[in-house]
Image (spheres, rainbow, N blue to C red):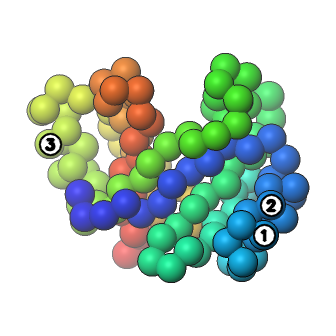
């Protein structure tokens, strides 16, 4: 893994949160994207070299809706930038981590993504992401 790519925050109302985080960071989000296959609308903020992703559920069965139901709003995942996501998935499986999707899927912001089950990572949902070439 090379660096933290972004931190994902689950929110109930992304419009309201876009305003809130704009005040916090002093700058508006630079893009929004809906990933219908994942049931999420997202928006991205750049904070210096770092990125923050806000996630709102687009339907009641969305993983974000379920997360907010259980835990409330807050930090949802930490995403790490990887050079070769397939190699990294194999490496982490060999180390005993539970990978939720063995085949990388399309994520927001032009990325291939895979998630590690939080039960295998001390309760933290980890996202691996590789920039699509
Ligand atoms: Zn993410």
Residue at disc 3, secondary structure = helix
Q: Is disc 2 surrounded by few (<14), some (14 to 19) or many (20+) residues within 10 Å?
A: few
Q: Is disc 1 surrounded by few (<14), some (14 to 19) or many (20+) residues within 10 Å?
A: few
Give residue 123's position: percent from left, percent from top.
41, 26
Tell me which numbered mark, 3 or 2, is placed earlier along the sequence: 2
Q: Are marks 2 and 1 in contact (CB under 8 Å)?
A: yes
Tell me which numbered mark, 3 or 1, is placed earlier along the sequence: 1
Give residue 56's position: percent from left, percent from top.
74, 46
Residue at left offset 72%, top offset 78%: 26
Measure the C-alpha gap from mark 3 to mark 2. 39 Å
Residue at left offset 37%, top offset 60%: 4
Q: Are marks 3 and 2 in contact (CB under 8 Å)?
A: no
* Any part of residue 68 in sight: yes
Residue that mark 1 sits on: 23
Q: How many marks?
A: 3
- Residue 20 tag number: 2
- Residue 74 tag number: none
Measure the C-alpha gap from mark 2 to mark 1. 5 Å
């Amino acid at each position: 893994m090379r660096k933290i790519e972004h931190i994902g925050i689950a929110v109930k109302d992304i419009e309201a949160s876009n305003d809130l985080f704009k005040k916090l960071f002093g700058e508006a989000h630079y893009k929004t994207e809906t990933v219908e296959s994942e049931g999420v609308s997202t928006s991205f903020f750049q904070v210096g070299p770092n990125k923050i992703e806000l996630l709102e559920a687009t339907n009641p069965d969305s993983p974000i809706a379920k997360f907010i139901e259980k835990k409330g709003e807050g930090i949802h995942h930490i995403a790490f930038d990887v050079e070769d996501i397939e190699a990294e998935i194999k490496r982490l499986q060999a180390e005993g981590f539970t990978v939720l999707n063995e085949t990388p899927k399309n994520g927001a912001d032009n990325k291939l993504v895979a998630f590690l089950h939080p039960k295998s990572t001390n309760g933290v949902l980890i996202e691996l992401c590789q920039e699509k070439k």
